[in-house]
Image: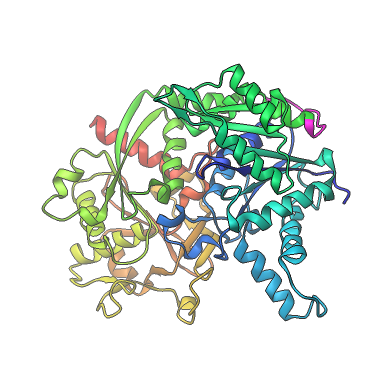
Amino acid sequence: MASSTKYIFITGGVTSSLGKGIIAASLGKLLQSRGFSVTIQKFDPYLNIDPGTLNPYEHGECYVTDDGAETDLDLGHYERFLNITTSQENNVTTGRIYNNVITKERKGEFLGKTVQVIPHITDEIKSNFYKLGQDGKFDVVITEIGGCVGDIESLPFIEAVRQARWDLGPNNFLVIHLTLIPYLKAAKELKTKPTQHSVKQLLEAGIQPDILVCRTEHHLPADVKKKLALFCNVQLNCVIESIDADSIYDVPLLMKKEKLDERVMTKLKLSSKQNTELENWKEFLGKLKNPTQEVNIGLIGKYVSLPDSYKSIIEAFTHAGASIECKVNLRLISSEEINPDNLQTKLDDLDGILVAPGFGERGFEGKIETVKYARENQIPFFGICLGMQVAVIEFARNVLNFEKANSTEMDPETPYPVIALMEEQKKIDQMGGTMRLGAYSCDLKKSSKAYSAYGKTKIQERHRHRYEFNNEFIKEIESAGMIATGKNPDTGLVEIVEIKNHPYFVGVQFHPEYKSTVLSPQPLFVKFIQAAIDKKIK
């Protein structure tokens, strides 16, 4: 297979959650800084078609792309680090692979052959490996293989990687294996044996890693690196230390110091097209680490015991805070624990309140109480998706005195359905991939806080919802002081609500956090943090 695109595969061993996504994104950033066009894709070995139907506790947040794909949260890292947009093609699961193969079998495309894992499943995996590199748009395609080497479910992916070396040829193919070097306190030494076993499992599958990236809490001495090189069959300079960092945004610079990009370029016979030295990145890190002020922001949600459930929101605060040299102390508070009796105690010292997205009734009334508290006490408020819907319901109940106002998601019989199921959602009986997903346009009113944040009247943001502001109530709600300041030009769907005479009260139906990156912080987050700073100063 002739290809001008270079393919890098990143596998993981010893344990999951070592940070393959961060290493992939960091390597992508380094190659980008040398003038290469790079994209990253994630192959997940679970049977769900996509993470859209997964509880956030299972897999962290579900990330959404411009083209409406519900994907793994690592795609968020790819976009945040590389300042690029990803798509449906950048995240593939075992479920998608099998679904495609079975669909072809039902259509008779295999001409009566027995359909098997090899070659049919592995061929389908490989065709998805190569898809992004086929039109020559990218110099390098980095592919992260989810899970751990040795997992039963990832075997077809590992076999497909083995075959890819044969398809692509040695100068177009590279395997980086991310592994763990644990430190035993009692023995006071770093142990290489888990990595040796992990590499042995890869070798049994027919794959020799080219580079080892070793996650560690302590620096790797020369003798440990030598041992790893000798017993894992890699060159000494291809044993890369990946020590725990203060921030994920330090990792590209740490990997540059370890010369990961140079090792990759040597093995793939690539020459730098430029070398920008990551000046913008260093400037961002400088601001991140040397804030001139700080604020306390409460993130109110029901999945707070797993912060990854709100990964994009947390990172959007990091980007926006750094851009105005402000440290954001983010406090994750469970909406299930909030009630009128403890409201003051839990929220009293906050400079700003964000009510997070979510689904279902659990913790809903706690969110209502929180919004009421922020509205009445003039605390800067930001509501995202369900957070915006909660703000509308709270306003209808407590300002318009629509006593049982609600969303038809929570109460199908409510006399005041100020939030209701979207028309096109009423006929849907399948859960997966059927919400309003992806980027949609929004027109902003010039007098609004949203306009002052974006500085333009037309924006595009990403969505993930089924229920919407019910326009039957718009006149009453607006006449009482909650204004629809952003609407979809095609459907009239209310995208943004704001309250007059409040320092900052903004609710958005879309997910602004998905488009926030290191080099392009999300404007609504920047303005929200600024409002929190102003409140604190007052």
Give the vertical position of 189 relative to 499 (above or below): above
Give the vertical position of 213 relative to 77 (above or below): above
The colour scheme is rainbow
State the extent of the magenta-drawn residues as a range: 267-276
Q: Residue furthest top?
A: 222
Any part of residue 442 in sight:
yes
Q: Residue furthest left?
A: 341
Q: How many marks?
A: 0
Q: Quadrant of residue 235?
A: top right
Give the residue at x 76% y 59%: 127
Task: Estimate the x, y position of residue 307 in percent, counting from the top left.
Answer: 38, 46
Q: Nearer the viewer, residue 130 or 424?
A: 130
Residue 272 is inside the magenta segment: yes
Image quadrant where one finds the C terminus: top left
Q: Residue furthest right?
A: 2
Give the residue at x 40% y 25%: 185
Give the residue at x 56% y 30%: 192
Q: Nearer the viewer, residue 292 or 221?
A: 221
Give the vertical position of 436 relative to 327 (above or below): below
Task: Estimate the x, y position of residue 119 in percent, counting from the top left.
Answer: 77, 64
Kindly report the secondary structure that dominates the magenta region of the rendered protein: loop
Any part of residue 39 in sight:
no
Residue 427 is inside the magenta segment: no
Task: Estimate the x, y position of residue 288 in percent, counting from the top left.
Answer: 45, 27
Task: Estimate the x, y position of residue 213 in percent, counting from the top left.
Answer: 61, 32
Q: Is residue 380 left or right of residue 311?
A: left
Q: Nearer the viewer, residue 373 or 92?
A: 92
Q: Is residue 270 left or right of residue 347?
A: right
